Image: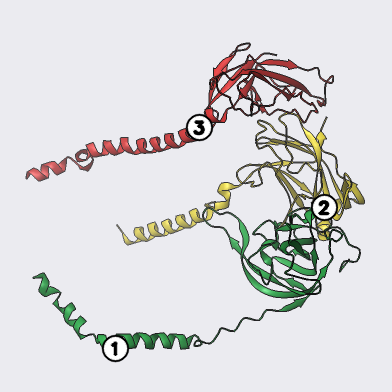
Chain colours: A yellow, B green, C red
Amino acid sequence: MRRWAAALGGTALVVAAWGIALVTPEDAEAERSFVVPVEIGDRGEGRNLAVTVTGIRAADAATIDGWVAEGPWLIVDLEAAAVQSELRAQLSHATLSVDGRTFRASERPPDSLFRSALAVGVPRSGSIAFELPEEVFGDDLAVLSLGLSADPRLDSLIELHLEPSSLDRVEEAELMSSGWAR
Amino acid sequence: MPKRRFRWVRVAADRVPTKWVAGIGIGVFLAATAAFGGLETVEAVSLPELSAGEEHRNDQLAVTVKRAVLIDELPLAGVTVEPGERVLALIVDAENRWDEPLPTTRGYSLSSTVALADHPEVEPQGISRYDDTTANPWLQPGVLATIVLAWVVPADRHAGGDDVRVVLNDETLMTGTAVISGQYWDDPVPAAIVTLDIEDVGAGRDAAEPDPGAVGE
Amino acid sequence: MTVDAVMNRRGWWRRNALPLVGVAVLLPATFGVIAWNEWNEYFSGQPTQAVVAPPGASVEFEGAVWGPAEIEVMDPGAVLEAPAGSRVVMVAVPVDPGTDAVTCLPPTLRETTGAQREWQHATFEIGWSPEPDELGSCALTGTDPFTITVAFLVPLDATGPLAVELISPEALPRFARLLVEP
């Protein structure tokens, strides 16, 4: 083989290796969630989870069934149902990601759709509440994600983008009682 | 001949002054001991001393131990006592300074970072919120929460007015490898000591209920 | 030309034909056997082998006689707390345990066609309080005949025919599937 041919071949291989290293997905990609983007009022359906976010509210204090707590709070009203099976069909994953920080739906309200059981084909309605630091309400983007498993890897996630800074803050807001949506 | 081939090993072995081996060994041991400071007791690393209401801050949590309360029982904080036992409860302000929510269940965040200095291996038996008694509450990033940590103690171990020393640990952020995924805090190391006066509230009004006279209210 | 040279001329593939065929057969067979073993172990713990009873018939399973299952579709709105868009389906399964007591989980209801959705009983969600002799499962039932009575909340778009499925943990992967016609 001519010397220039060997050099060219070698260079081509190095470039090819570099290119493959660049396009190789990260390990996290292999277990990424399947995201279903939704808007307020849209029904989003993933694996065994169908969700309609019906409203988003901001309040200094949240209340339900005699429980009152200072926040501030971001309250998400929604309808949710299972699609295929009621086995392990609970809304166990509910997070709000803002500016690199992740918040988990609060376990504090005595009645909330968070971690509640869902029925196949018959939607339930209610609220989930996020207890947040004040500065989050000045942010322009927050991502709400809802899923069935506390570990959201490789499962569907219903995702909604919202703008916390545009929400009207009220003094006190009551969570919706959980119940059948219709 | 194989025997002849290995004869040099024997010759060399015979030349080793076995008489001195013990002496050399002792010498090496003493030299190594001396290099590490001899047989002197290691001086304890002195930790910052805090008092009630002073904050300890690390990358995971900001913790302020506000009060230490001795009470007959505290079922709302998730602890049950047998006869001859009482409850020692710490009321702490905690803020999650990380960017993910932190659980307070056994082995996590406050459970593994706040300990009684006399029994540092005993995690709190009950953890709940001071305001609405939510058991094992999650700590949301940047959100301050007042938490009651409760230990069941023999009734005669502490008395009102005694000092109680509390260890606050710092933990290291670990990244899971192999079958563990994600990040978590582990490896608690003592980082500060808080000394508080114990208030004996007797049968008490439940310390997990809001108290208008509480520190910082 | 030596004998050796003649043999060499036949080429490496030909000389190793037999071992190569062996590898080509054994390698996939190894993976096949391992996969079959693992899946078999998994499926043996799942309800995968249905013992089917046609509508109106009973079936022998686990030494007991199950069925015939009776189904009653309640009028929408007329009963209990069924939300709009759904109806309550009451299911009664008579069980004759025979000589030994049987154990089973609360029955589930499944679509046998279409999406094959599956419902857990909703006895408490719809606010129905069963009578003491209307059992929800067969735990601690002894050897006397008894009837399992449960209620399901099913969306109006559920497609029949439906089946009541009864799982006895000891009998897995076998389970009873009683077809019902509304």
Please tell me which residue is depicted at 75% across the width and 59% down the height of the picture.
B141
Q: Are marks 1 and 3 on the same chain?
A: no
Q: Residues within 10 Å of mark 2 (few under 14, many from 20)?
A: many
Front label number (3 vs 2): 3
Q: CA distance from mark 1 to mark 3?
A: 70 Å
Tell me which corner region of the image, top left, top right, bottom left or bottom right, holds residue C71.
top right
Q: Are marks 3 and 2 on the same chain?
A: no
Please state the chain letter of the residue tagged with numbered disc 1 in the rendered image: B
Name the residue carrying label 2. Answer: A164
- Residue B71 is situated, as x and y percent measured from the top left of the image, at 80, 63
Check contact, mark 1 vs mark 2: CB within 8 A: no
Instruction: Pick out the residue farthest to the front.
Output: B83
Please state the chain letter of the residue tagged with numbered disc 3 in the rendered image: C
Relative to A121, C32 lies left or right: left
Name the residue carrying label 1. Answer: B20
Please tell me which residue is depicted at 77% across the width and 69% down the height of the picture.
B65
Please state the chain letter of the residue tagged with numbered disc 2 in the rendered image: A
Front label number (1 vs 2): 1
**Residue A18 visible:** yes
